[in-house]
Image: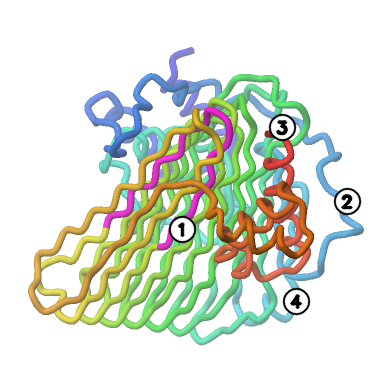
């Protein structure tokens, strides 16, 4: 069967509505006419990003999580394309909160999904990767928080990729926080088992923050070395909305991470903190953009990275203030520690200012661990290797402290420690 026929068959099996089938077909037809997104100083055009056997079904192994150890807060766990656990407290259901897999949402909450699925934060016609995603995505989740609903407990999503599976890991996460809603959301992408199968991942996360909504978004990405990944996280913020992003880019394979926030509304606010570690011969490109459309909007970017062995890590920080965005503020900082003579890095700050009555600034640095910091710790009896680990943990601490669950913070620290121990 042709790729389009496979897409149509998959859509029919999933019971997708006609509008989604049409979106898939239009995106498929546009793929060849679109260019790849421009990620400055990262050559990824020859990467294995376009795996087409997405229609294969995966059987869940049931071995990815100890459900007795999971918390009672809102949670979805998916293994490959299968949902293995959904839990949403009745009190939140009674308030109108929706949290389910993306295909169930298309059927049971069709109007909401149709309104926001790749229509606002990201559109399929934007570039080749977006079109590919709309044509080939095969699983994901949908979260809706109604007006004026504040959810105090964290909302979790855990997405496991089986390391021996050849099915592409094409996830779509759609989050809509309605007016004055407030949530804390924690997302984890993780490869389990040995990463033996070569395949690709195309992940899109869309966060719509309507007027006055407050979203605290944290994520830990831990995908395997044989998974070549393009992940796009997009925020669309209306008047007085805010999204605080805290993202750990801790993968083992080659990754492009594209993080964009559009400050459409007046008084909107986005803070993006991203940390990454590259090791071995992997290449990770982190492209972070905040675009100020609204007056008195605020966009801040903080990126810290560590490179081991012959790894490559590139940080592009782009702050763009559009004409008319008076009183806007765009700030960014990118810093990288290189722990090997073979490491390669770029910290590339870009400011595009089209308005006069604004404030903007940037800072960037690439270097080794500060010897004064090491000396201070070693003078108090701490061995050099342990002292170095403590310095690095502190360097990456901005994201660790933003994660809402203590056990996940500890998991994040263990991931960092594990990568450092390998060198």
Foreground residue among 144 and 270: 270
- 44 above or below 265? above
Q: In terms of sequence position, does the residue under pointer 1 or pointer 4 come before the other?
A: 4
**Secondary structure, magenta segment, majority class:** strand
Residue at 63% x, 80% y: name it: 151
Q: Which residue lies under the disc numbered 3?
A: 162
What is the secondary structure assignment of the residue under circle 4?
A: helix
What is the secondary structure assignment of the residue under circle 2?
A: loop
Q: Which residue lies under the disc numbered 1?
A: 113
Mark 3 burial class by Cα count in 10 Å: few <14, some 14-19, many 20+: many
> Residue 305 in the image: x percent, y percent?
50, 49
Q: Which residue lies under the disc numbered 2?
A: 66
Residue at 28% x, 53% y: name it: 349
In this view, the mark in front (3 or 1) = 3
What segment is highlighted magenta in the picture? 302-318
What is the secondary structure assignment of the residue under circle 3?
A: strand
Q: In terms of sequence position, does the residue under pointer 3 or pointer 2 come before the other?
A: 2
In this view, the mark in front (2 or 1) = 2
């Amino acid at each position: 069967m042709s790729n389009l026929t496979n897409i149509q068959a998959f859509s029919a099996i999933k019971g997708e509505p006609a509008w989604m089938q049409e979106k898939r077909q239009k995106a498929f037809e546009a793929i060849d006419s679109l260019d790849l997104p421009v990620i400055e100083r990262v050559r990824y055009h020859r990467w294995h990003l376009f795996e087409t056997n997405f229609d294969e079904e995966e059987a869940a192994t049931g071995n990815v999580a100890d459900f007795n150890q999971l918390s009672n807060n809102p949670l979805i766990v998916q293994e490959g394309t299968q949902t293995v656990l959904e839990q949403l407290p009745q009190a939140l259901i009674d308030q109108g909160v929706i949290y389910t897999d993306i295909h169930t949402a298309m059927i049971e909450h069709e109007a909401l999904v149709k309104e926001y699925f790749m229509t606002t934060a990201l559109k399929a016609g934007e570039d080749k990767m977006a079109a590919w995603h709309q044509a080939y995505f095969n699983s994901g989740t949908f979260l809706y928080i109604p007006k004026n609903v504040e959810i105090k407990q964290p909302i979790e999503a855990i997405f496991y990729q089986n390391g021996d599976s050849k099915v592409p890991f094409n996830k779509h996460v759609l989050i809509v926080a309605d007016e004055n809603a407030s949530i804390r959301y924690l997302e984890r992408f993780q490869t389990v088992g040995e990463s033996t199968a070569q395949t690709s991942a195309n992940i899109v996360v869309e966060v719509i923050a309507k007027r006055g909504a407050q979203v605290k978004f944290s994520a830990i990405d831990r995908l395997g070395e044989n998974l070549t990944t393009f992940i796009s996280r997009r925020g669309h913020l209306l008047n007085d909305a805010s999204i605080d992003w805290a993202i750990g880019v801790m993968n083992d394979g080659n990754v492009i991470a594209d993080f964009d926030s559009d400050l459409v509304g007046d008084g909107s606010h986005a803070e993006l903190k991203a940390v990454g570690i590259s090791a071995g011969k992997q290449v990770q490109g982190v492209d972070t953009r905040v675009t100020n459309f609204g007056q008195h909007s605020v966009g801040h970017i903080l990126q810290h990275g560590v490179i081991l062995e012959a790894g490559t890590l590139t940080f592009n920080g782009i702050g763009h203030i559009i004409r008319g965005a008076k009183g806007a503020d765009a700030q960014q900082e990118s810093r990288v520690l290189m722990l090997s003579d073979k490491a390669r890095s770029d910290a590339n700050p870009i400011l595009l200012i089209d308005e006069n009555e604004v404030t903007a600034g940037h800072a960037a640095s690439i270097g080794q661990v500060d010897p004064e910091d090491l000396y201070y710790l070693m003078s108090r009896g701490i061995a050099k290797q342990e002292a170095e680990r403590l310095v690095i943990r502190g360097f990456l601490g901005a994201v660790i402290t933003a994660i809402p669950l203590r056990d996940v913070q500890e998991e994040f620290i263990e991931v960092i420690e594990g990568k450092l121990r390998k060198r």
